Amino acid sequence: MGGIGTQEIFILLLLALVFFGSKKLPEIARGLGKGMAEFRKAARDVQFEITREIERASTDDSKKEPLPPKSQELTDKNSETAGSDEDEGTVPEGDRTGNNG
């Protein structure tokens, strides 16, 4: 199974001539050509915008400072909270229910 053959194209053109007439057919073809050109231009613009955004995102990512590994973040947070005096008012682990005895 292939595409449209020569006979099929000829039959389609003949049917278009019968339906639209010889005066209307060039106008329709001109309109189709303009529409196709406009579609190609719009598709090219969309492709350009996507490419530009991808390039901009990749340059933005390269400017950012790389994040430390997860294990290092956890040990840094634990060491900061372990020695702080801000936790004096917190409830100890065993007394979370509010019962003191």
Image (cartoon, grey):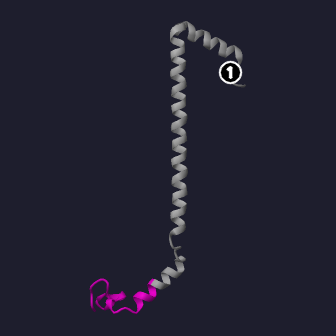
Q: Nearer the viewer, residue 77 or 90?
A: 77
Q: Is residue 59 above or below residue 3?
A: below
Instruction: Tell me the quarter of the picture where residue 40 sits.
Output: top right
Residue drawn at the location 55% of the way across and 19% of the way down:
29
Q: Which residue carries the number 1 mark?
A: 4
* Secondary element type, mark 1: loop
Magenta segment range?
A: 77-101
Q: Nearer the viewer, residue 70 or 37?
A: 37
- Pick the quarter of the image with the N terminus: top right
Q: Nearer the viewer, residue 73 or 40?
A: 40
Residue 54 percent location from the top left of the image: 54, 55
Three-letter residue code for mark 1: Ile
Residue 86 percent location from the top left of the image: 32, 89
Residue 39 percent location from the top left of the image: 52, 33
Residue drawn at the location 52% of the way across and 49% of the way down:
50
Q: Nearer the viewer, residue 14 or 38?
A: 38
Residue drawn at the location 54% of the way across and 46% of the way down:
48
